[in-house]
Image (cartoon, rainbow, N blue to C red):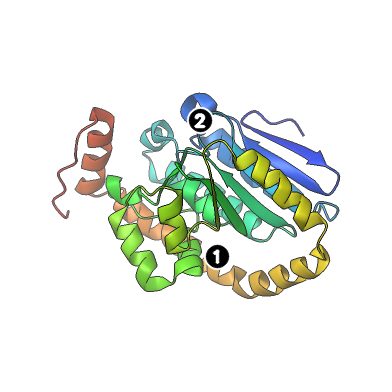
Amino acid sequence: MAYETIELSVNDRYAVLTLKRPEALNAMNEVMLNELADCFERLQGEKGIQVLVIKGDGRAFSSGGDIKMMLQKDKIEDFHEIMDIISRMATAYYQLPMITVAQVHGAAAGLGFSLAIASDIVIAEQNSKLAMNFIGIGLIPDGGGHFFMQERVGVPKAKQIIWEGKIMNGEEAQQLGLVDVVVKEGESEQYVQGFVKKLLSAPILAMLETKQIYHSERVEELKKVLSKELVAQTKMRQTKDHLEGIKAFVEKRSPQFIGQ
């Protein structure tokens, strides 16, 4: 199927999905979110594909949710529709019957970072800018960000990282357990190609069974977290701090939060 904001290419037993909004640093607008959800759901039935690489076109992996979309979806019903699409995307990605590899360069922030760390393997360039930075605009992580952070670093550290919203490079994120492999700037493509080759020459059916056992046990928990993120994010979008965060972002200044 032809997509507008993503591109899927299949090469025998592996596929590459490229986010293709380079002019917006691959920010996820409504079209991209719908296309990602649709693509991941379609891939559920692709038993011949054993590895999926996801990467970004241009200068970044993904800068996160599109701010313009967030400003336009000011009605609660419209916002809930977007969150439902995000939940579809995250749930389908987590249940893919293939090994998922995030090939990260440039920015992977907010929802883009949630998608990256949802992958089985995260490979990032040294100078990547990685951030679970929802806090900067008075919001909480979505796209299952709470769930995937907990899976990788545990609850205490996940809370601290979410609350700080710090921008990390590849090595800093690796030290925390959020990134699995760090490569030099400009070398992620070559490394990932070699990594995929090794995966496909391994007993990958056994590897996929291990993934299925772990993920099937936890998918209901992911769905519960996504539901709670919807409720909490709806609440946060109505706060003065969120409005100030968005205004400060647009005006390119530091926000002045008041805890309301």
- Determine if residue 88 is in view: yes
Amino acid identity at mark 1 = Lys
Query: Which residue lies at the image location 83% right of the left edge and 57% below the top edge?
Result: 201
- Looking at the image, which residue sits at the far front? 184
Helix, strand or loop at disc 2? loop
- Looking at the image, which residue sits at the far top? 23
User: Which residue bears the numbered disc 2?
Assistant: 59
Residue 126 higher or lower than 222, as above or below: above
Helix, strand or loop at disc 1? helix
Residues at marks 2 and 1, CA–CA distance in whole angstroms:
32 Å
- Determine if residue 80 is in view: no
Q: Is residue 166 left or right of residue 51?
A: left
Query: Which residue lies at the image location 60% right of the left edge and 50% below the top edge?
Result: 89
- Mark 2 vs 1, N-terminal side: 2
User: Which residue bears the numbered disc 1?
Assistant: 223
Which of discs 2 and 1 lies nearer the camera? The answer is 2
Q: Is residue 169 left or right of residue 244?
A: right
Q: Is residue 232 left or right of residue 194?
A: left
Residue 95 higher or lower than 12, as above or below: below
74, 245: nearer the viewer: 245
Query: Which residue lies at the image location 55% right of the left edge and 58% below the top edge?
Result: 180
181, 2: nearer the viewer: 181
Query: Which residue lies at the image location 50% right of the left edge and 30% below the top edge?
Result: 59
* Residue 140, position as x, y percentages in the image: 35, 55
Crowd class of label 2 (few under 14; some 14 to 19; many from 20; radius 10 Å): some
* Residue 19, position as x, y percentages in the image: 60, 35
Quarter of the picture containing the N terminus is top right
Residue 183 higher or lower than 4, as above or below: below
Amino acid identity at mark 2 = Arg
Q: Is residue 180 left or right of residue 154?
A: right
* Residue 31, position as x, y percentages in the image: 57, 34
45, 18: nearer the viewer: 18
